[in-house]
Image (cartoon, grey):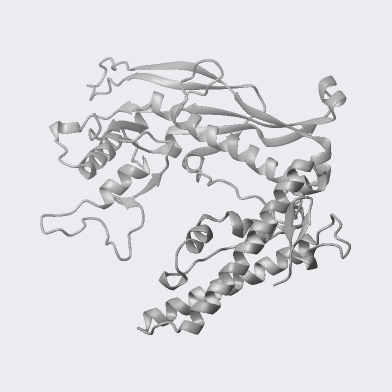
Amino acid sequence: MKTPYLIEGVPGGAEYGRKDGGADIDIKQLSRDLKAATDEVQNFAREAKERLDRGEQLSRDAKEKADEALVKFNELSATITEIEQKLARRGDPDAEKARKTVGAQVVEDASVKAFCERPPSKGSVRFETKAIITSLTTDADGSAGDLIIPDRQAGIVAPPERRMTVRDLITPGRTASNAIQFVQETGFTNNAAPTAETAQKPQSDIKFDLKTLPVATIAHWVQASKQILSDAPMLQSYIDGRLRYGLAYVEELQLLKGDGTGANLLGLIPQATAYAAPGGLVADTMIDQLRYAMLQAVLAEYPATGHVLNPIDWARIETLKNDIGEYIIGNAADGAAPRLWRLPVVETPAMTVDKFLTGAFKLAAQLFDREDASVEISTEDRDNFIKNLATIRAEERIGLAVYRPEALIYGDFGNVA
């Protein structure tokens, strides 16, 4: 074994310092030798474990080689530890910035220390080194994360969109005014009767009311920079579609439930006739209730054309079974068209759970489009001009006239308290 030099109080082999005994040390060579010694210890530990697992005894020669490897490992470890301490006390800026060497990591590893303190024939030690070049994106030695480019998928993943259905139930129309006005018959006293010759004929009374309904405006807007709209043309079309969807979403709610206050439409449900099973009939199931609602509309001289239900209620109806466990409507394998009592069933989350609306929709109401849904972009605002922004606005104007409230039957299934 070579006699170590003393380099400012640091023991180390001559191969790690200058030939003249100066203070410069070849840290890289020392680290490589320490890693080689570590590998030798690990290989022996692995081989010893394999032999012991097979029931073989270690030879005296193998134990001596292991002792030599451990002695060399310990000497190199002590040397590099002392060097690092001396450099740290000197305040060497390069040493402070440098990443820990593999040798330093091995020396500080708790499992390696524990292995060195017991005979090598009793187990093995495992030491994992981390890559010197890392995926860190911080400003540090070995950081290369900025070179890794994410695999960006094209387009934007949009959230799910509700399928709009209520508009299709109603008679369409157009208007060029800001209000819808119509004359509605609100009372009729029919005194028609057989009359004798020369006798006075009976008089009937008909009452009319003038109804005026305002055209409602549904609108919203977002703001974006002019640069992003120019640099990402697809973003403008995406915003256009999302804004139009927002209008349709609110329109569906307004057509069904608008309460007529302020700028709201007066929707179908607030003007519908309350469900009341005619003729003293008693509904035992949800299916019975919908049938009697149809009957109520027929007796009002307006044969129903469809049912509007929440998807939860339609699922409850579809899964109803008879006494022997068979589905009453359709079957689970093939399903069934959404129809009940010969009429189509319209499912929409816009309908409140446990409620239903049955009626002659096209006879009952008409939807008037004053201005179709449109999207406009403007930069004219002073604040927009200064900040280089664009305002994107979506807007539509519609009116709803319910001519025959008795043609719409609104009821409660009674499943939810």
Q: Residue at x 50, y 16 (%)?
A: 261
Q: Residue at x 32, y 15 (%)?
A: 203
Regarding residue 260, the answer to whether it shows in the image is: yes
Q: Dividing the image into 4 quarters, which one contains the C terminus? A: top left
Which of the pair 394/383 is nearer the observer?
383
In-image side of 382 versus 181 (left or right): right
Which of the pair 299/366 is nearer the observer?
366
Which of the pair 377/176 is nearer the observer?
377
> Which of the 4 quarters of the picture holds residue 296?
top left
In-image side of 152 versus 227 (left or right): left
Q: Residue at x 70, y 69 (%)?
A: 33
Q: Where does residue 59 sit, x and y in percent of width and height?
A: 45, 84
Q: Dividing the image into 4 quarters, which one contains the N terminus? A: bottom right
The residue sitting at the left extreme is: 323
The residue sitting at the front extreme is: 3
Which of the pair 174/25 is nearer the observer?
25
Regarding residue 139, the answer to whether it shows in the image is: no
In-image side of 18 versus 302 (left or right): right
Q: Where does residue 218 sit, x and y in percent of width and height?
A: 61, 28
Q: Residue at x 85, y 30 (%)?
A: 388
Measured along the vertical axis of the image, is residue 380 above or below residue 287? above
Q: Where does residue 399 sit, x and y in percent of width and height?
A: 56, 27
